[in-house]
Amino acid sequence: MRVAVPQKIVATGFPIMNAEQVSSSESQDLFSGIPREINNRLMETGDFIGRNLTNAVLYSRPDIAPEILPTTGSAESVIVNVARQYNAQFVLSGVIRGFRTESTEFVRGTGVLAEIKSMARDFIGRRSIDFDVFVHDGFSGVLLFQQRYSASILGDVSLPNGYNVGSERFNDTRRGIKSAN
């Protein structure tokens, strides 16, 4: 009987294309938290040994990802160098394409009530997230997997500071993983 050897994968951070879609009062953990949580779930399968390099971003231009614009050398060498540095067969990367908040109602009028409704739409409405996940071969730099994921929630759409993706506190919110399963 042959025993499967777990593959090694290193996860890098997911830059956001439109940084203004996340306010400074919200958690900044999406960028490192999404790839960290994907890496954790891969490790839970027993098929992967994961390393987190989620503080590093491969894409200086997220709008053209998965193409990498290297400062020197080739794009493949960026992937290969990361894989070699972390002794990994695969490199997980991605881009948050959108994290939009949309109001579910049109705010009419003037005065205090209209102002309150206008401020409330940043917290009560619909929020959508779209992100791409890429997996590259660590030996050649070739793109092996590319998938876009999209989800939206309705209601309280703020992501409070201090809430980390994958934490129990995050999972218990409408934005958490439990609601996505």
Image (tube, rainbow, N blue to C red):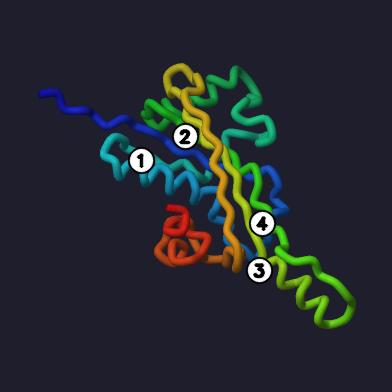
Judged left or right of residue 82, residue 89 is left
Q: Residue at x 26, y 39 (%)?
A: 46
**Quarter containing the N terminus:** top left
The span from disc 2 to disc 1 (Cα, nearest Å) is: 11 Å
Q: Amino acid at mark 2?
A: Leu
Find out whether the residues at labels 3 and 2 contact each other: C-beta distance under 8 Å.
no
Residue topped by disc 2: 92
Residue topped by disc 3: 124
Residue topped by disc 4: 22
Q: Amino acid at mark 1?
A: Leu
Give the mark nearest the N terminus, 3 or 2.
2
On screen, residue 50 above or below 139: below
Q: Give coordinates of residue 173: x percent, y percent.
A: 49, 66
Of 169 and 141, the residue lying toward us:
169
Q: Amino acid at mark 4?
A: Val
Find out whether the residues at labels 2 and 1 contact each other: C-beta distance under 8 Å.
yes
Give the mark nearest the N terminus, 3 or 1.
1
Residue topped by disc 1: 42
On screen, residue 152 above or below 146: below
Marking on residue 27: none
Q: Amino acid at mark 3?
A: Ile
Judged left or right of residue 165, residue 122 is right
Give the mark nearest the N terminus, 2 or 4.
4
Judged left or right of residue 25, residue 41 is left
The span from disc 3 to disc 4 (Cα, nearest Å) is: 15 Å
Find out whether the residues at labels 3 and 1 contact each other: C-beta distance under 8 Å.
no
Residue lying furthest bottom in this view?
112
Find out whether the residues at labels 1 and 4 contact each other: C-beta distance under 8 Å.
no
> Circle 3 sits in a helix, a strand or a loop, which is it?
strand
Q: Residue at x 42, y 19 (%)?
A: 139
> Circle 4 sits in a helix, a strand or a loop, which is it?
loop
